Image: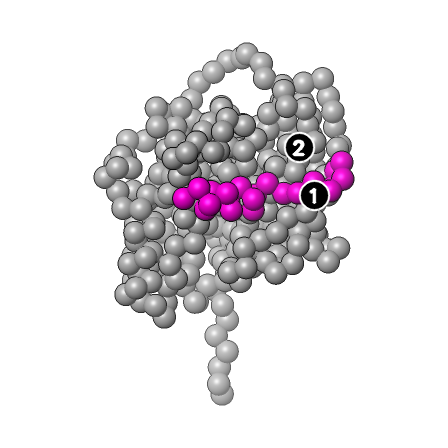
Amino acid sequence: MADKLEKLLALLEVERIDKYLFIGNSPSYPPRVFGGQVLAQSLYAASKTVEASRSAHSMHAYFLRPGNPKKQIVYEVDPIRDGGSFTTRRVIAKQDGIPIFSTSVSFHAIEEGLSHQIDMPVVTPPEELETDFEFWSMMAEKYPDRFTGPLMQALERRPVKRRDYLNPQPQEPEQFMWFRVLDPAGDIGDDPVRHQTILAFISDFALLGAALLPHPYTGMSPELQPASLDHALWLHRPLRVDEYLLYAMDSPSAHGGRGLSRGTFYSRSGELVASVAQESLLRKKRVVSDS
C-alpha cells in the first residue's frame, strides 16, 4: 500500500521548475485528465508560493478544455495579491501553450472568530459498508466488457448507498460516501497542504453523479456526454485525509444540459471541514440516423 500512496502523492505534488512555474503529469489510463487531478495539482502549486502561516480557504475553478493524459501539464501561478491577512493566487494550467483549466485560490492567516456549523447527517458507519475496491473488482470480473477494476487503490471509498450501474433508477438527489487515504505507515505526515491537496482531488469524485440521481443515467451511460464545468471549494477547518471523512452530496437542480451539485465534508467526530459546489455538463448525445 505504501507504493500506491507514494504514486498518488507523486501525481498530485507537482514539480517546481521556477518560482511561479510547475509541471505535472497524469496517469495514462483515463481517456482525458481527471478534473480532481488538476484541481489538486493547482492547489498544491499555489500553496507552494505562499508563506506556510497562511492556509488555503477557498478555490474557484473553471474546466476550460479536456486535458490529454499523455502530455505534461504546465501550471503558471500568478501572485496577484499579498495582503495583510489574505493572499490570492491565480493558476492557469496549460498543454501545448493552450489553457485547459484556470483557478483562483485564496489563503488566510489563521485567526480567531465566530464559529458555528450545521450538523453532520446520521449515516451507516464505514466499517459496515463495502469498499469501492471490493465492488469494482467484482463488477470487472462479472462484466469485463463494461467495467474496469479499481484504479486509485491508495484511496478507500465506501458509499453508504450504491447506485445500480447496470440499470440505474431515478432516486432522490442525495448520496453519502466515506473515504480516507490508506496510510498504515503514517507516511502522509502532518503537512496541511498535503491533506488539503488530496481533499481537492477527492472532491471531484462522484459529485457530478449526484445530479444524475433523479434520472436513469450514470456518468458511464453511453447516451450522455458528462463533464465538469466549474468547481468551488471552501476549506473551513483543519482536516486529515488519513482518517475517515464523510462526503455528503446533493443536487438542487438540473436544466438546459447542466446540473448543479453541492457537497460537504465532515470528520468522523462531526466537524464540518470543507464544502464544495460544482456545475456540470449533462448533455444527451445526438442520435445520428442511418437514413
Q: Residues within 10 Å of mark 1 (few under 14, many from 20)?
A: many
Q: Quick one: quadrant of the N terminus?
A: top left
Q: Is residue 58 magenta?
A: no
Q: Which residue is mark 2?
A: 48
Residue positioned 36% across, 44% down in the render: 157
Q: Quadrant of residue 84?
A: top right
What kind of element bears circle 2?
loop
What kind of element bears circle 1?
strand
**What amino acid does circle 2 point to?**
Lys
**Residue 43 versus residue 225 in the image, above or below:** above
Residue 247 appears in view: no
Q: CA distance from mark 2 to mark 1?
A: 10 Å
Q: Which residue is mark 1?
A: 22
Expressed as whole percent of the image width and height from the top left, the position of residue 187 reads 47, 33
Toward the viewer: 182 or 129?
Answer: 182
> Magenta region: which residues?
1-22
